[in-house]
Image (cartoon, helix red, strand yellow):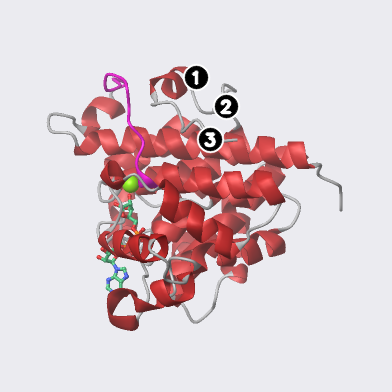
């Protein structure tokens, strides 16, 4: 069934996803602080606030600001927004630091992005980590979500795997938000099949999304062994795993985040991706949604966030 989504309804979906993304990022990064243990979260104990967000959230806020402004991704403007707003101490990847510095000092983004990693372009998980709210914004069209996700990725991630990771996460978030609007939770296998169908079939990201579907119902250590947990900080090593977690726990935000923390690896980013997808389905302060006390513990978002 086709339907019309007004701009403010799109933005509300994107903002709920951003809440889930930023809380996942901020809580996940707490487990890099010495003395914090994943087992504490599993036992129900939260780290003391404030939970500071990282580059994942800062870039996601720019994506949402771009959509609020123009309803689409203008690559030139998004590249400049990423570059101008980057606070250096937020934990950006080394490739991203270089690309954003080049853009800030006048290098066109296609040149800056293509120069990364000896001309391979970045296949880091950074394009995937910031894109879930964009998927939620395009809840009415996974095709459009995929197209705009590609545009949002290209300004920093020229490598096909980096782009595939962003497309996969955006389509998952669009499907989750659509399920929320329909009042009908998408089944895990259907969600993953829809994502696989939207992603470059030649990519490793595609292979791992397919593998994630085969591993539904399997225990976490087995899943991490097969799909990774982001410890390599690449899209290939991150996205399949995060989609397995999101598809498995789509109705239960706290359980989804606990799973990311238990898995280890690039926890702020896996929890940001998973949190962004799951919150597109659950919302905030709802049963199974982003808990309001978690949201309060998170450092406030930048003042310019829409
Ligand atoms: O993708 P990116 O923005 O990284 C995001 C991650 C998240 O975890 C953030 O929270 C932050 O911690 O970083 O930044 P990049 O530096 O472009 O990519 C991340 C990493 O992926 C790099 O440091 C490399 O280790 C790896 N990588 C590559 N390795 C080999 N060849 C990215 N591209 C390549 C490549 O082409
Ligand atoms: Mg980070």
Instruction: Pick the residue in front: 137 or 285.
Output: 137
In the image, residue 86 sits, relative to residue 255, either above or below, namely below
Q: Earlier in the sequence, mark 3 or mark 1?
A: 1
Based on the picture, tell me whether residue 51 belongs to the magenta stretch.
Answer: yes
In the structure shown, which secondary structural element does the residue marked by tag 1 occupy? helix
Q: How many marks?
A: 3
Numbered mark located on residue 304 in the image: 3
What secondary structure predominates along the stretch shown in magenta? loop
Q: Earlier in the sequence, mark 2 or mark 3?
A: 2
User: Label 1 belongs to which residue?
Assistant: 292
In the structure shown, which secondary structural element does the residue marked by tag 2 occupy? loop
User: Residue 247: where, in percent of width, then height?
Assistant: 52, 49
Q: Quadrant of residue 156?
A: bottom left
In the structure shown, which secondary structural element does the residue marked by tag 3 occupy? loop
Instruction: Pick the residue in front: 129 or 202.
Output: 129
Q: Is residue 104 left or right of residue 138?
A: left
Label 3 crowd bin: few (<14), some (14–19), many (20+), radius 10 Å: few
- Please state, as top left, top right, bottom left or bottom right, where the C terminus lies in the image: top right
Q: Which residues are magenta?
A: 44-55
Numbered mark located on residue 284 in the image: 2
Label 1 crowd bin: few (<14), some (14–19), many (20+), radius 10 Å: few
User: Residue 91: where, in percent of width, then height?
Assistant: 28, 47
Please, which residue is most extreme toward the front here?
A: 106
Residue found at x 86% / y 53%: 2
Q: Is residue 279 left or right of residue 68?
A: left
Q: Earlier in the sequence, mark 1 or mark 2?
A: 2
């Amino acid at each position: 069934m086709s339907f019309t989504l007004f701009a403010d309804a799109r933005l509300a979906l994107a903002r709920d996803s951003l809440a889930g993304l930023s809380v996942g990022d901020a809580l996940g990064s707490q487990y890099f602080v010495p003395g914090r243990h994943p087992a504490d979260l599993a036992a129900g104990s939260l780290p003391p606030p404030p939970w500071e967000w990282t580059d994942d959230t800062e870039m996601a806020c720019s994506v949402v600001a771009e959509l609020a402004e123009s309803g689409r991704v203008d690559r030139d403007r998004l590249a400049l927004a990423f570059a101008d707003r980057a606070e250096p101490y937020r934990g950006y990847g080394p490739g991203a630091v270089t690309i954003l510095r080049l853009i800030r000092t006048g290098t066109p983004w296609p040149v800056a992005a293509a120069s990364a990693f000896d001309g391979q372009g970045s296949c880091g998980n950074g394009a995937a980590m910031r894109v879930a709210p964009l998927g939620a914004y395009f809840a009415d069209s996974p095709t459009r979500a995929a197209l705009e996700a590609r545009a949002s990725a290209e300004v920093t991630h020229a490598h096909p795997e980096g782009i595939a990771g962003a497309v996969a996460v955006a389509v998952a978030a669009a499907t989750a938000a659509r399920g929320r609007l329909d009042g009908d939770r998408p089944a895990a296998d259907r969600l993953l099949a829809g994502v696989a169908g939207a992603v470059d079939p030649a990519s490793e990201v595609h292979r791992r999304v397919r593998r994630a579907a085969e591993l539904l119902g399997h225990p976490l250590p087995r899943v991490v062994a097969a799909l990774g947990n982001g410890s390599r900080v690449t899209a290939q090593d991150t996205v399949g795993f995060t989609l397995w977690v999101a598809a498995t726990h789509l109705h239960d935000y706290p359980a989804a985040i606990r799973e990311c923390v238990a898995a280890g690896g690039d926890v702020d980013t896996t929890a940001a991706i998973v949190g962004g997808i799951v919150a597109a389905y659950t919302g905030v302060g709802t049963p199974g949604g982003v808990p309001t006390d978690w949201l309060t513990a998170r450092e406030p978002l930048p003042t310019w966030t829409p």
